[in-house]
Amino acid sequence: MKMIRKFVILLLILAIPSAVLAQDTTTVEAKSEEIGDNLDLEAVASIFGEAEDLEDFEKRLNDPETQINNLDLNEDGEVDFLRVMETVKDNTHFIAIQAVIGEDQYQDVASIEVEKDSSGETSVQVVGDVYMYGPNYICEPVYVHPPVFFGIFWTPYYSPWYSPWYYGHHPHYYRPWSPYPSRRYRTNVSVNINVNNSYSYTSVRKSKTSVDIQKKNRRNDYEKKNPDQSFSKRNPGVENSRQLRRDTAPENRSKDEKSIDKGSDRKVKEDWKPSSERNEPGKDKVSPAPKTPKNNDPSLKGKPQTTPKSTPKAKPAPQAKPKTQGKKR
């Protein structure tokens, strides 16, 4: 028995250093993914420019096909529905994007501020919420073609858009999906950015009216429950998500620093199409736009309409000539 006890004591003594070493190796933990990495503001700006109105913009934000949004703040395993709430004052349209996270629980994630100055010029800024992205994270899109609904923005009969949807009540098109790892999300979402627009970054917020509106209407229910998860507390000494990406990606530092003043330097693709006109594998939607000019063009009347598939079928016709010549002989 004494020998057994000595053997057990020896094993315990040998196990103690291993246990201490194991504890030491688990004390260093990597930071979790940044919240702001799950909603790309250039993608938000891009689909805003393509939308027919703010109702359509909200639909594009929550489209299960394009998956612009990757936020799961309430951690229920599904992305949060993003509602759009608009406030209009004089020549300013303040458009808040809020994550729906519970019964009467909302969190501002970004805002779009549209303002017309005294000369009639319209400016657009997409501002990341300070809790999500840090202060002064502002994207300025310049559209190749201005959004179509800007034409009615400044009319006296314009009605602001207030999303009718709330927790547990979503539109029929919305089918929640599971969020991706943020790296995969950033790769996938880039195909939904119109590269013919330009996207520059600034630390100056143009609209003072928008600042006042936001102070009165901002929702921060998630922030109240998780004060230690704010960008500034998670990343002390870092101004915002833009600076964090530069600091953590040395190979892209010069490019990012340049893009702050001159845009994101995205190469223009001549064959780029909006998501609504793409015929991508696995999607059932095909744009009906080409059908209209074919049916209504007067120059096509009385002319046979051929397709690329019918062209090769006309080749066998010349093969009949050698046979008729042989019979005449």
Image: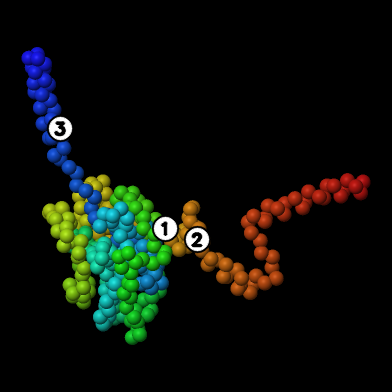
- Say which label, 1 or 3, has the lower sequence index: 3
Q: Which mark is residue 285?
A: 2
In the picture of the structure, the residue carrying the numbered disc 1 is 65
* Res 137 quadrant in image: bottom left
What amino acid is found at the position of numbered circle 1 in the picture?
Answer: Glu
Q: Residue at x 69, y 68 (%)?
A: 303
Packing grade of label 3 (10 A; few <14, some 14-19, many >=20) is: few
Nearest to the observer: residue 112 or residue 69: 69
Nearest to the observer: residue 1 or residue 73: 1
In the picture of the structure, the residue carrying the numbered disc 3 is 22
Q: CA distance from mark 1 to mark 2?
A: 10 Å
Question: Is mark 1 in CB contact (under 8 Å) with mark 2?
Answer: yes
What amino acid is found at the position of numbered circle 2 in the picture?
Answer: Lys
Q: Is residue 224 visible?
A: yes
Q: Is residue 314 left or right of residue 114?
A: right
Indicate whether 189 appears above or below 152.
Answer: above
Query: Residue 269: x, y in percent?
Result: 42, 57
Q: Residue furthest front?
A: 1
The secondary structure type at the circle numbered 3 is helix
Q: Is residue 147 left or right of residue 244?
A: right
- Say which label, 3 or 2, has the lower sequence index: 3
Nearest to the observer: residue 11 or residue 322: 11
Nearest to the observer: residue 235 or residue 144: 235
